[in-house]
Amino acid sequence: EPEVTQTPSHQVTQMGQEVILRCVPISNHLYFYWYRQILGQKVEFLVSFYNNEISEKSEIFDDQFSVERPDGSNFTLKIRSTKLEDSAMYFCARGGVYEQYFGPGTRLTVT
Amino acid sequence: GIQVEQSPPDLILQEGANSTLRCNFSDSVNNLQWFHQNPWGQLINLFYIPSGTKQNGRLSATTVATERYSLLYISSSQTTDSGVYFCAVEYGNKLVFGAGTILRVKS
């Protein structure tokens, strides 16, 4: 059973469009994270979210990105005005007592 | 920031062979995790191992925190072990990943 689920599994969008990626934790947790992995590269941290607020963000996480937990359960990553270089796998993770557990990812393709 | 280096970058094994993957990190860390990324892209937790040694079936891992490295051992490799193995260390409130080791096991 996955720790978190993510939707959609794959999204294709045109450059300049907005996309919303969703993460649904199986149970209540306080810590959530978004990471991305450009094809063939390592996994990179984007942002951490604790108790409904951003805890830390990377240099990648600029004004183009935003996160929120609109209904207290789903956890979303919004990318405004997508660029070709935003094409990547986006992972949601939840924090455990000791370790992080990753969702299956959303593959975003920007054309 | 912290640097995480993995070696070797690529490894090809014959089924049944053993292997050792290495992860070096440049600063003290509170947490270290090993992941296997399968062909579908999923990141599968293998070990949470900030220090010491753990074993899970054919896999085992050792972290020597004072010397800032961790090792992942795969014994009697199988074709299903193929994929990318990532080491990740907790630094601040995030995981910092290495570049990974691509493992190919041939039958």
Image (cartoon, rainbow, N blue to C red):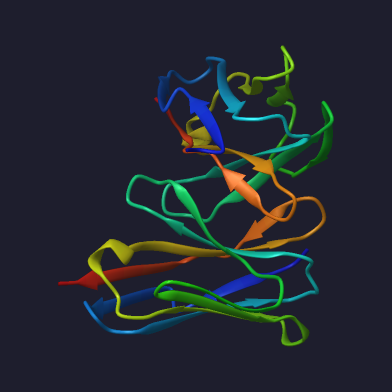
Quadrant the N terminus of chain B occupies? bottom right
Q: Percent x, y for residue B73?
A: 46, 80
Residue A54 lies, in percent from the top left, at: 82, 32
Relative placement, left or right, of B34 versus A67 is left
Q: Residue furthest bottom?
A: B67
Q: Quadrant of the C terminus of chain B?
A: bottom left
Answer with the quarter of the image where residue A58 lies: top right
In this rendered view, identify the residue nearer to me: A40 or B102: B102
Q: Nearer the viewer, residue B27 or A28?
A: A28
Name the image quarter holding residue B65: bottom right
Judged left or right of residue A87, residue B65 is right
Residue A51: horizontal and vertical position, in percent?
Answer: 84, 30
Q: Is residue A86 above or below residue A35?
A: above
Which quadrant of the structure image shows residue A46?
Answer: top right
Looking at this rendering, what residue extends furthest in the left direction? B107
Q: Can you give x and y, in whole percent of width and height, for residue B35 in the image?
A: 51, 60
Describe residue A33's horizontal placement relative to residue A5 as left or right.
Answer: right
**Farthest residue, direction top:** A71
Q: Residue at 66% of width from left, 47% of height from top?
A: A45
The answer to whether any part of residue B99 appears in the image is no
Above or below, comparing residue B56 to residue A111 in the picture: below
* Residue plotted at (57% across, 18% down): A20
| Residue A61 in the figure: left or right of residue A104 | right
Judging depth in this view, the residue of B28 and A26 nearest the camera is A26
Identity of the residue drawn at 52% across and 63% down: B86
